[in-house]
Amino acid sequence: MTDQSVAKTIHLSPKEGASLKQMSLEEHLPEATLLKKLVLEGLAHRRLGWACSAYERGELDISSAARYAGLSVYEMLDELRQRDVELVSPEQFLEGLKDIANLFDMPELREVTEELRAS
């Protein structure tokens, strides 16, 4: 199986084109290579931002957010810490306690979990 490329075309203003040319000279890269690099960096940045936001909204768990962003779970946790995103919400914590109570048949813990949830 071979990878196939997909060609995309963009239009730049003269000023943007001059900036691209200058940057390609500074980076010692052909303009096409630099454009690809910039697009890939931009896509990675957007995916990471979306994954962090989705995690913060509770739409993704940490593993899914990391996978979407193309990071390890450890890297994703570090990124979330840098962005001051709460890693475990009180609701997630209580849900985890409830799961432990059910798994180990601990009615006292289950009762405390329900009391905390009600308060």
Image (cartoon, rainbow, N blue to C red):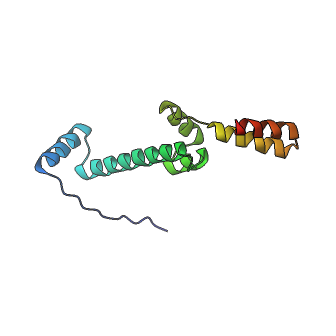
Q: Residue furthest bottom?
A: 1
User: Residue 77's spot in the image, x, y percent?
Assistant: 56, 36
User: Residue 104's spot in the image, x, y percent?
Assistant: 86, 42
30 left or right of 115 in image: left
Q: Residue at x 36, y 64 (%)?
A: 5
42 left or right of 109 in image: left
Residue placed most toward the observer, 111 or 28: 111
Report the label total: 0
Q: Residue at x 88, y 44 (%)?
A: 105
User: Residue 93's spot in the image, x, y percent?
Assistant: 68, 38
User: Residue 118's spot in the image, x, y percent?
Assistant: 71, 39
Q: Residue at x 83, y 46 (%)?
A: 102
Residue placed most toward the observer, 115 or 81: 115
119 left or right of 47 in image: right
19 left or right of 2 in image: left
Residue placed most toward the observer, 116 or 34: 116
Quarter assignment of residue 91: top right
Q: Which quarter shows the C terminus?
A: top right
Q: Residue at x 82, y 39 (%)?
A: 111
Asked if 5 appears above or below 114 in the picture, the reply is below
Q: Residue furthest left?
A: 14
